Image (tube, rainbow, N blue to C red):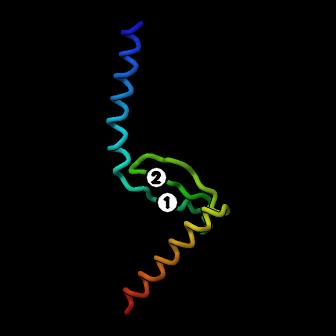
């Protein structure tokens, strides 16, 4: 039995070592559009899809509002 317990502990240690590498990648948001309307927001960490956010939800609205504000400010700075 102690061999199985050791095996479990070793496996857990290995998975903990790989977890920080994935967490080093920044989280990004991608809008999924259909016919010019945002139908979903994908939360990504690197190439890994973490979750899908409904753009009608409060969090989805906050993300869209933040993006449009940043995008608008960048466009104004480029034209000035």
Task: Report the residue at 65% width, 64% height from top.
Answer: 58
Asked whether 59 or 3 is in front, the reply is 3
Asked whether 66 or 72 is in front, the reply is 66
Left or right of 32 on screen, residue 75: left
Relative vertical location of residue 29 with respect to residue 2 in this rendering, above or below: below
How many numbered discs? Answer: 2
The residue at which mark 1 appears reads as: 30
Asked whether 72 or 35 is in front, the reply is 72
Task: Report the residue at 52% width, 72% height from top.
Answer: 66
Residue at far bottom of view: 80
Task: Report the residue at 37% width, 24% height from top.
Answer: 11
- Looking at the image, tell me whether mark 2 or mark 1 is earlier in sequence order: 1
Neighbor class of circle 2 (other Cα within 10 Å; few <14, some 14-19, many 20+) is some
Relative vertical location of residue 11 with respect to residue 64 in this rendering, above or below: above
The label nearer to you, 2 versus 1, is 2
Secondary structure beneath label 2: strand
Residue 64, picture quadrant: bottom right
Tag 2 and tag 1, C-beta contact below 8 Å: yes
Percent from the top left, x then y, of residue 51?
54, 49
Percent from the top left, x then y, of residue 15?
37, 32
The residue at which mark 2 appears reads as: 44
């Amino acid at each position: 039995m102690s061999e199985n317990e050791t095996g479990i502990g070793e496996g857990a240690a290995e998975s903990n070592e790989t977890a920080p590498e994935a967490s080093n990648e920044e989280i990004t948001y991608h809008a999924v559009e259909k016919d010019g309307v945002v139908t979903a927001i994908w939360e990504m960490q690197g190439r890994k899809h973490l979750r899908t956010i409904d753009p009608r939800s409060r969090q989805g609205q906050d993300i869209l509002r933040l993006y449009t504000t940043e995008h608008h400010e960048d466009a104004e700075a480029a034209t000035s």
